[in-house]
Image (cartoon, helix red, strand yellow):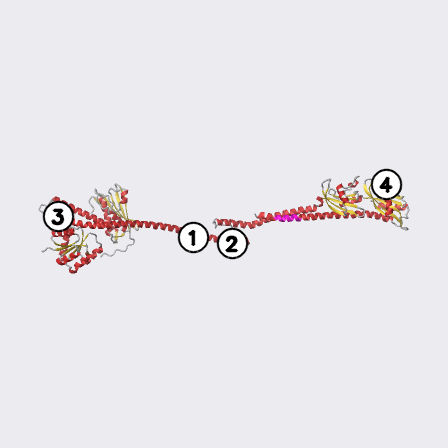
Amino acid sequence: MLLIFLIVSLVPLGIVGYYLVNLSQITLNKAISRDQEALAVGFADTVSSYIINFRNVLFDAAHLEDFASMNVVKQQGLVNHIMQLHPAFLEISVIDASGVETVRLGRFVHDNKMRDFSNDDLFKKVIRAGEIVGGLEKYMGSYPAITMGVQIINPATNQAVGAVLAKMSLTALSSLLKTGFPEATHTQAAVIDSSGFLIAHSNSKEIYKADAKLPDDVLRILLQNDAKTGGGEIILESTGERVLGAFAEVTELGWVVYIQRSVSVAYQASDDMLKRTWRMMLIVTVFVLFLGYAVSLVITQPIQALREAAIKLGEGDFDYLPDLSMPNDEIGELAHTFMQMSESLKVKTAEIMSAKTELERLNRSLENRVEARTRELKSAQDELIKKERLAAIGQMASVVGHEIRNPLAVINNSIYFIKTKNNLMPNPEPKVIKHIAIIESEIRQANGIIDEILGFARTRELNPKLVRLNSYLEDLTMSYPVPPQIEMIKTFSPDNPTVNIDADEMTQALRNLIKNGIEVMPEGGKIYVRSELVDAGTVRIDVEDTGCGMPKETAEKIFAPFFTTKARGTGLGLAVVKKVADRHKGKVEVTSVVGKGTCFKFFIPVVQNPPPPAPQG
Amino acid sequence: MAAQKILVIDDDTQLRESLAEVLELEGFKCFQAGNAKGGIASAKKSVPEVVIMDIQLPDSSGFQICQELRKFSKDFILIMMTGRFLSAEEKTQGFALGADEYITKPFDIQELSIRIRQLLSRRGNK
């Protein structure tokens, strides 16, 4: 992301750079162009001086004070001297005022025949104007040459007495150009006259050609141009090459110096500059990118780390945060703040979590308590219903029992009366005596039933006392009338625990159990009375018989009031046992195997650390 | 020796009469009363040696009659009859107010007769 940003930020720099490079290239190109022009101008001066220099030689010679008065031989000697001194001179002639050649010296022509110049245009012009430079020609059809002439002045009369005409070679100009522009492939320099005649060329071969001239398009531009100097880019028609051309007029002569360079060479410097600039730009770009990347690493690395940390934090992972120890700058500060935030978050989250846990725990505990309370309430309600039912039964039993006791008492009294009277008779009827006995027995049984019912229904305060269980059980079993066909086997716990019991009720309960056991064994059997410590706080008293046992369904209902399997019975015996067990904060259980026997297990609490028994009084 | 007098107080006529007749068979002279008021009047008039009374009477509780009777004589033997179990407190209260014995209905006449004679002979010895 940052990289893209950097690249985008580089674009305007590139544009500016491109613009500046272009600008400087244009400027440079212009400068190059101007330089080339200046070169052309310089060359034009050189050409001009060169020509004038030679004219001056002639002029100086012709104007020697005694040249006009010299004889031919002397003149010849001087001319010869000049020819030797200046190899550029090809021919020099001395002509008198009438146009007759008096001296004729030629470097390559050894014709001594004097010519008549009276009709020669150049001679006429010299005589008229004083001096000339002109008459370009291809000397001997090969290289360019020029003719220059000066008057011969008689110092005495200051009259022209003749003229000196000289032809001079211009190949030296080409050599000069070649020296100035040695490179021939891409650079050319030339000097032409106003008619397009090729005077000199940097490539000297060019001037030896028969129809030596510059390319037409270049020539056209040069000849049509009125300016003394100028230059610019042109595209050569012949080769299609782009070239930079510059020209300058050679003053007085009306010639033009033309310099042409191939654009690729001319602009090499600017091209170099361009290349270098682009290379520089590239290096700068790469450098900037690398720098940017490095900076981004330095900047984004911590931010990335922060981001990862933030994500982890978001996931609730406080323990494995990345290392955020950072330099002491803005990002470092941010990291520090972040760490503080994460610490604070951690603490807060922990608080929330612990509060949540606590809340859940409380909720659970509340639910449990509500459940427990509901259970308690339900059982209390059940207990209450049971108690109310039992209380109602007791009340009814009490009323019924009481009301039946009066008629029973009356029957009892009456039967006693009858029995007494019958016994007083001299011959008492035996059958009457038997029936009286039956009635008396039934009265006793009925009374026993009432006793049982009233005993169950009675609501009296429990009157517990501390007793040693073994001696209590010993007394109880000893006083119980065991029938002869029954064997009673007693096993008492050696711990001999102390229990807090209401002896009246406990005795009634245990006697009921023993009585039940005996009753289910009419044919005889064994009855076991055992005591055993279940744990430190509980003792169990077993009353077990070897009778017929009972099925499970019976065992489940056996402690319910008025439930009985006997032909005669109130069904209250075991209900009383259960009631006594409940009132002593104990419990009673029954296990029975049909055909083997039944075992009642009576659990009561043990009194731990009982006070020492009161001294016997 | 003249027959000793027993006053039977009970609102149940059948019980009262049958008990009286049986006791007469045993050689006692019996008077009867159906309520507390009649009982107290009869006791004042005939001065019995023994009073056998139901603990619950329609016009008064047995304990109140106990008190009333003991106000004018401490000589007679007072036996309380009850159709139900009495609590220890009730028994203690009864004894404190002057009762000599408790019997629960129905009762064995022979036993009662023997008990009455025992109590009478002890009293006579004093």
Q: In the image, is residue A11 part of the stretch drawn in magenta?
A: yes
Residue A186 point in image, percent of width and height: 73, 43
Within-10-Å neighbours for mark 2: few <14, some 14–19, many 20+: few
**Which residue is disc 4 drawn over?**
A109
Q: Establish whether labels 1 and 2 are both on one chain.
A: yes
The answer for how far apart the CA atoms under marks 4 and 2 are is 108 Å
Q: Establish whether labels 4 and 3 are both on one chain.
A: yes
Q: Which chain carries label 2?
A: A
- Report if residue A178 is visible in the image: no
Q: Are marks 1 and 3 in contact (CB under 8 Å)?
A: no
**Which residue is disc 3 drawn over?**
A418
A564 vs A532, nearest the viewer: A564
Pick whichever of labels 1 and 3 is earlier in the sequence: 1
The residue type indicated by label 1 comes to: Ala
Pick whichever of labels 1 and 2 is earlier in the sequence: 2
Q: Which circle, 4 or 1, is nearer the viewer? A: 1
Q: Which chain carries label 1?
A: A
Q: Which circle, 4 or 3, is nearer the viewer? A: 3
Q: Mark 4 lies on which chain?
A: A
Q: Mark 3 lies on which chain?
A: A
**Which residue is disc 2 drawn over?**
A337
The residue type indicated by label 4 comes to: Val
Q: Give the range drawn in magenta.
A: A10-20
Quarter of the image for residue A72 reads: top right
Question: Which residue: 9% across, 45% down?
Answer: A427
B59 vs A267, nearest the viewer: B59
